[in-house]
Amino acid sequence: MRDIRRARIVLAVLVLISVTMILLDLRGGESGPLGPLRAVGATVIGPLERGAATVVVPVRSYIDSVANIGDKDRVIADLTVENDALRAQLDTVANDRARVADLEALLGLIDANDYVTVPAQVIAVGPAQGFAWTVTIDSGSRDGVERDMSVISGRGLVGRVISVAPATATVLLLVDATSTVGGRLAGTSQIGIVSGTGRQDVLQMQFLDPLAVINLGEVIVTFGSEGDRPYAPGIPIGTVKEMRGTEGQLTRSAIVEPYVDISVLDIVGVVLRAPERSEREPVNVTPTPTSTGGAP
Amino acid sequence: MTVRRVVLCALLIVIAVIVEVTVLAPLDFPGATPSLVLVVVAALAFAFGPTTGAACGFAAGLLLNLAPPTTATLGISSLILTVIGYALGRVFDSDTRPLMLTTLLTSGAAALSILAGAALGGLLGNPRIVWGDVPVLILTAALYAAILALLVIPVVNRLSRAFVPEAYPR
């Protein structure tokens, strides 16, 4: 009987501590009274996760490669065909590209491939029952990663860094319900706000111009934030999959399919800084000596 | 509480938390992530009774809410797992522990923990909760927990008998 009484007291005390923690954490968040506890937790548990990942990741990629072994021949054949087509295109494009490069230099635009990134491996994922779409990567403050940096993969935007520990960082993925990104249609330059829905493969985009003409399949890129934080400009987000609401309606929105499939996230890059951008100068109507015959 | 018991519980809980976020969550199972942590807490509660169950639940919940990449409010998992650890330890604080019953109880606890997590999150204003997904999460969580329980509970039981024999007077 004494055991039961002791168990009840322990239960009551622990429940009380838990409730106190919830209240304290809700008040302050990261800068609140429990912030240091969180920081210590991430600093201590992060390296443990890294250690586990050194074992888990090779096994995971081995299983993936065995599972996909039948697909390999088909993939190689597809890629060869695509490669030939692209090479043919490239010859015709070379001429245009020289002109584009001139114009870009003239306008001070940047090339999306020039971002300075630090590579990172995804080592941990938040449990689905937490409803949050967040992952841990194995780069942290000692690799130069800071809060609010953009995270990209080979396909496009992944998300942004929301907290950093010495050896690890936590990334809020695009599809998280609290994630919002300024987006721009690459074709028509219509701007809007891309927000996560909490579902794995669906984003929503709210357009600022209710009369905008938007075609399905159009590419959406990031609009870019002041100082490239949290989002650097020009990173591909996804394509328009479906329109919601009719033209002229106050809230016009689109369902967007993100480029990045978060269920297969592996190696990502944290954008340390966007490429150097020269100060924009007024564009001269007359060709300048620096432009090498850009006029058609 | 002997030192050996504390060490065993701490070790199992840390391993469970790390495995859950680095192995089970990235595998992207349909529905919920299999909650190894909850199953380990349940197994420890079955092995050592309500006091240890509650303490292990609290520690595991705290660790789960601190391990990156979580963004959950600190204390929610502790609250839920403390109560589960106590309740399971209370219900089965006897020597007869048929695996069928412990598995069913663990599975039920997993389902309840999803519901409680969503309800608490909703009450506290978590904007992320997708209520439409909750039934699927509950069903899958119960299923995964039952499978894990069948594997984990006998192992934890044997470990605790081997390392902490004084908890099992003959």
Image: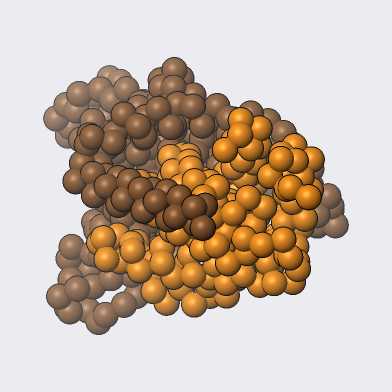
Chain colours: A brown, B orange
Q: Residue B43: tell me if it is visible.
A: yes
Number of numbered markers: 0
Quadrant position of residue A207: bottom left
For residue B22, side relative to residue A127 (left or right): right
For residue A100, side relative to residue A137 (left or right): left
Nearer to the camera, B27 or A262: B27
Instruction: Identify the residue shown where x is 78% and y is 50%.
Output: B170
Q: Residue A237: tell me if it is visible.
A: no
Instruction: Identify the residue shown where x is 43% and y is 40%.
Output: B66
Q: Is residue A20 above or below residue B151?
A: above
Q: In which quadrant is the N terminus of chain B drawn?
A: top right
Quadrant position of residue A122: top right
Q: Is residue B40 above or below residue B69?
A: below
Q: What is the x, y in percent for residue A120?
A: 54, 31
Instruction: Identify the residue shown where x is 51% and y is 58%.
Output: A1
Quadrant position of residue A166: top left
Q: What is the x, y in percent for residue A101?
A: 39, 32
Q: Is residue A244 above or below residue A174?
A: below
Instruction: Identify the residue shown where x is 64% and y is 57%.
Output: B46
Nearer to the camera, A25 or B12: B12
Nearer to the camera, B144 or A82: B144
Q: What is the x, y in percent for residue A36?
A: 31, 29
Q: What is the x, y in percent for residue A143?
A: 46, 20
For residue A286, side relative to residue B2 (left or right): left
Spot the residue most to the bottom: A246
Q: Is residue A50 above or below residue A16?
A: above
Nearer to the camera, A184 or A253: A253
